[in-house]
Amino acid sequence: MSITQNSKIRRITDSTLVVGADIAKKVHVARASNVRGVELGKPLTFDNTRHGFEKLLTWIRSLMLDHSCDNVIFGVEPTGHYWMNLAQFLRREGIQVVLVNPLHVKKTKELEDNSPTKNDRKDARVISLLVKDGRYSVPHIPEDIYADLRVGMNERDRLSEDLKRVQARIHNWLDRFFPEFTTVFKDWEGKAALVCLHEFPCPVDVQEKTASEIVQAWRKNGILRGVGLSKANLLKEMAEQSIGLTEGLQMGHQELMILLRQYDLYQEQLELLMSEVERLVSQIPGTQQMLSVPGVGLVTVAGFLAEVGDLSGYDNAKQIQKLAGLNLKENSSGKHKGRTTISKRGRPKLRSLLFRCVIPLLAKNAEFQALHRYYTQRVQNPLKRMQSAIALSCRLIRILFVLGRKQMPYDPVKVLGPVHMERLQNAA
């Protein structure tokens, strides 16, 4: 049992009212118990409204008065997003809200009545018993600027996904109506290519234009370099040889115009959103130092803080490592020693963000390149490339944590450590 687990158990005293709630979309169920697990009062059913929340608060205060409790701890399952409004309400009333792993509830429910039966009343009871035993985690709910940052980065992820879908549909359109277009323009998202898609997207449209008119269209849109008569002649040549569909062109034009408007809209929205994210990040102390890491950009720092929240709420970087699900787990028994892997218990967005950042760092950051080379080529216990990337993700957490907390610029010797730097130099 870890020290953290002991502290959670000590949090539950004889005067603590333990409440477990099963959260749904419209109606919730709450049940209370004392430190010994004895149920107190009757189960409460309350609506997901302010009136329902105030009804819950009155019920809690009544139980505290009847059973001489001076503090309360409230446990819920973090299923969906419906628990967030209730958690905000209770926290403003001074009631601590903790989270219980849904998998723990599923595994433990048969201990209640030796039956696999599942219902809201039973789940609420199981949650309160798990909280009583210290089987809970304290959520790091972002506040103030960090809450805005999380909402902004979540919206960025949604816009990015929508943009990818539109990009794929435009690719689909080109494959059907003008498959030779990508031989003229390697990137259809380039400025000159987009002008063509807006003004003369189909082979028949290109054939109606002269090479000079095509160049004039590019110049009119401010494209002065990189394309000229040779590119225009190549476009016309490909249009004449095109095997693209010639049926359904009228609605094909409409389809592309709709897709291009969506593409332009998502690009504009992303640009506006990221400018606001940049403004928020600039207000957080330590972010400029975090951005000083070669290869780490605004998206990484903003995403990291959106998932982690205020760095002052953590004692050390290992807590963030566990939050990301990058802490190690091992399956061993007797003489059998199983494989050691990461737990993957935590915030998947944070874990994915760190991994996506580490891959470019292996190409852009000299220190990460040296570490990766050392991890994969050392004599004792060499790591595989993927294992090394995971280890470097954990190191990136420590680096960002130190830079953000101490507000110190990136320095290879201070951040990575002189002993390790000497070891890397000897290995090289």
Image (tube, rainbow, N blue to C red):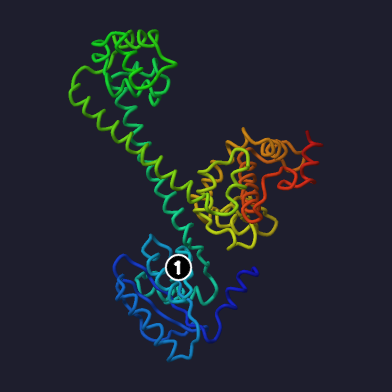
In the image, residue 238 sits, relative to residue 296, either above or below, namely: above
Q: Residue at x 58, y 76 (%)?
A: 9
In the image, residue 11 sits, relative to residue 200, either above or below, namely: below
| In this rendering, position of residue 11 left or right of residue 40 | right
In this rendered view, identify the residue nearer to me: 47 or 331: 47
Circle 1 residue: 105
State the image coordinates of residue 112 (x, y, percent, origin top left): 44, 76
State the image coordinates of residue 358 (x, y, percent, origin top left): 59, 41
| In this rendering, position of residue 59 left or right of residue 342 | left
State the image coordinates of residue 88 (x, y, percent, origin top left): 41, 68
Q: Quadrant of the N terminus?
A: bottom right
Q: Quadrant of the C terminus?
A: top right
| In this rendering, position of residue 314 left or right of residue 306 | right
In the image, residue 402 sits, relative to residue 193, either above or below, namely: below
Q: Which residue is drawn at 37% across and 22% down?
A: 222
Q: Which residue is drawn at 53% across and 45% down?
A: 300
Snapshot quadrant of residue 31: bottom left
| Numbered label tally | 1
User: Tag 1: residue type?
Assistant: Val
Label 1 residue SS: helix
Snapshot quadrant of residue 176: top left
In this rendered view, identify the residue nearer to me: 103 or 272: 272
Mark 1 crowdedness (10 Å alpha carbons): few <14, some 14-19, many ≥20: some
In this rendered view, identify the residue nearer to me: 222 or 45: 222
In this rendered view, identify the residue nearer to me: 274 or 299: 274
State the image coordinates of residue 249 (x, y, percent, origin top left): 20, 21
